[in-house]
Image (cartoon, helix red, strand yellow):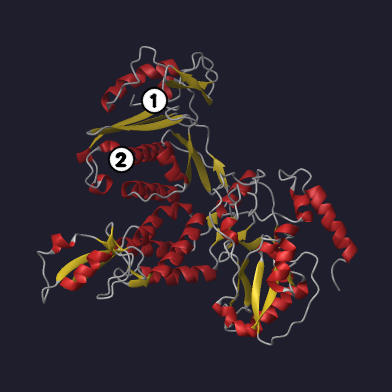
Amino acid sequence: MPLFVEEEVQFLRQDLLTKFFSQDIDEGLPALLAHGVPTGIEQTIPAPGVWPAVEAPERLALELITCEEPWGSGLSNPKLLMKLVQDDVDEGFAAWLPGGLLEAKQLFGEAIGAGKLGLVKKEGSAPRLVGDSTVSHANSLCRIAERIELPSLQDVKQFLSRYPQSEWCGFLLDVSKAHKRVKVAPKERGYSLFAVIDPEGSTDHLPLSVHPFFFVYRLPSTCL
Amino acid sequence: MSWKKIRLGTEIKRIGWDIALTSNFRATLPTDKKCRLETVLGLLSCKGRKIARKELEKATGLLSWFATGVRCLRPWLCHFISCYIHSPKINIKALDAKQLQEVHGLTVDGNISANAALSDVRKGWQIRASAEALLTTTGKHDQVWVKFAEWEPTHIRVTEAVAEAASFYKAMVQLQTPVPLLEADGPLTPAAADAFADAHSAGIFGWWLPPNKDLQPLNLKWFSIQLAVKDLPDWFHQGKKDLQTHICALEALAQLVLTACIIEDGLARPAWAGSVVLRQWSDNQGKVGAFTKNMSMRPSFARLCQQHGVASAMWPVNATPGLMPCPGALCRIRPSGNSWTNQRSGHRVGKSCLIWVESFAPPSGKIAQRRYHKTVHGVQWVECSGLEHGVVAGLALAG
């Protein structure tokens, strides 16, 4: 039985977004998360003051491209790739575009880019689906005016040293597939397209999910 | 939620470390990381061994993570980075006339622009010496030896410096000494150090107030050391006799000597603290930048950072540098009489120091709080509260 019912989850989510961020330096974040966050491709994401601000580089003279097939790791195992993609679709992280690129252009106009999916297999772990948006130039076109820093042991030292006489208890919390749960701004979702080669040649149509992280479209196996 | 990853307690694993939040706040290297480091360092401890460049880069990344936790070990990372960034692989090929002609045709600004068809000279290689200069050296069958530098080879040979650093790191990893997580600011200690250098001579100078002493002139201690090229070891000047080019390293040396003096003088350390943070101001941005990341790629500076690392581990002290708000702000003084600002000799400083100390003594006896003030007549001022005339808490040896 789940720990919370859906209404309680919604309440907690709203409570966290309003109260937790009410005195946060990044006060615009709750609204952005609710609407969908920008990718930084169309406009530079400004620094809200959480991380050190940097001067964003000038936009590179690159065009977005649409790749027609996955990476070799995906091509060599199309059934596994299809299964993992379908798993993401079932969880609401992805959505099929039955009409392919044509449909994508109708939805997003010229603001589209298709990267490549691939499979990563590490010893002792289940294979993972990875999406490469560097190859479509989407990643290179993202501009963020701040430098995100990862914590180190020095940060732990500095924090604990402020309260040397206190008693502490630690807890670790991890959100599974967190990056896929972040809603992207509706008009910028076309930058996260991926093509898969359907070995069965089937053309099942699946309903679009509410806010998918990425879109997938099928290409017939003759494209191999 | 990833339920299997939830943890609650006083001992957790985070950012790769086993962190204990008990009465002795400590971080320990986990066993799996220790094994990985030992394996990698074992390979790198053999001088001359051939290793894939990607493996060396991965190993450097892992060591960099480890040295972020054990900060005093960071200065030795420069040897690993130098191995694959600064040290190309040298390829010497014997080329006949046709092959040489082809290589000449492919050379653009000293670099090979495409793979040669007649030989195994590859794109991206750099000609290290002109073929004409090497014509005096001939191989068999009318061939010429040509030296190429390959900056991104697939494999690299472990250098002596890397092997030594790897052995050192391996010994440190095997100790698996816990990293203390509590630091305390040291007692407020007015102190300053500076260096000067010109083409022929250099000097370092510093002063400090010993612990539990009133801020009175007679209580201050100082050091003043004049240096010539002959006084410095080969690894410091590396044949560059113009000492001005070593000013960053000299500044670091001055700060290291000052740190040693302050600690030897009885730096207080609370019983619960693992190490004491000693914050030092410096007006040299290069020095501050290198000390902030606790690493420098310059050989002389790297050695001084390593000495600092040894000192940090022994006492233990975490010397954290900060940059003064403007260059030279710490070390300019009111030019009353102007007897100071042009001092360049360590010997003359001794006498002048007494003059300066008298004007520094605040009538109220309060410890001076340094604050940046403004530029007046091209001289930067630092105003100290509790003093009558805005006397700067520092000294410059150079104008």
Circle nearer the viewer, 2 or 1:
2
Could you tell me residue B107's position as x and y percent? 27, 62
Where disc 2 sits, the SS reads helix
Displayed quadrant of residue B25: bottom right
Q: Amino acid at mark 1?
A: Leu
Could you tell me residue B153's position as x and y percent? 35, 68
Q: Amino acid at mark 2?
A: His
Instruction: Confirm or deny contact between disc 2 and disc 1 (CB under 8 A).
Output: no
Which residue occupies 45% across, 27% down?
B329
Where disc 1 sits, the SS reads loop
Q: Earlier in the sequence, mark 2 or mark 1?
A: 2
Which residue is identified by label 2? Answer: B246
Q: Nearer the viewer, residue A179 or A219?
A: A219
Give me the chain letter of mark 2.
B
| Residue A175 appears in the rendering | no
Which residue is identified by label 1? Answer: B395
Question: Which image quarter holds the C terminus of chain A?
Answer: bottom right
Q: Is residue B40 above or below residue A182?
A: below
Which residue occupies 9% across, 64% down?
B136
Displayed quadrant of residue A13: bottom right
Could you tell me residue A219's position as x and y percent? 66, 79
Q: Is residue B226 left or right of residue A18?
A: left
Q: Is residue B192 left or right of residue A138?
A: left
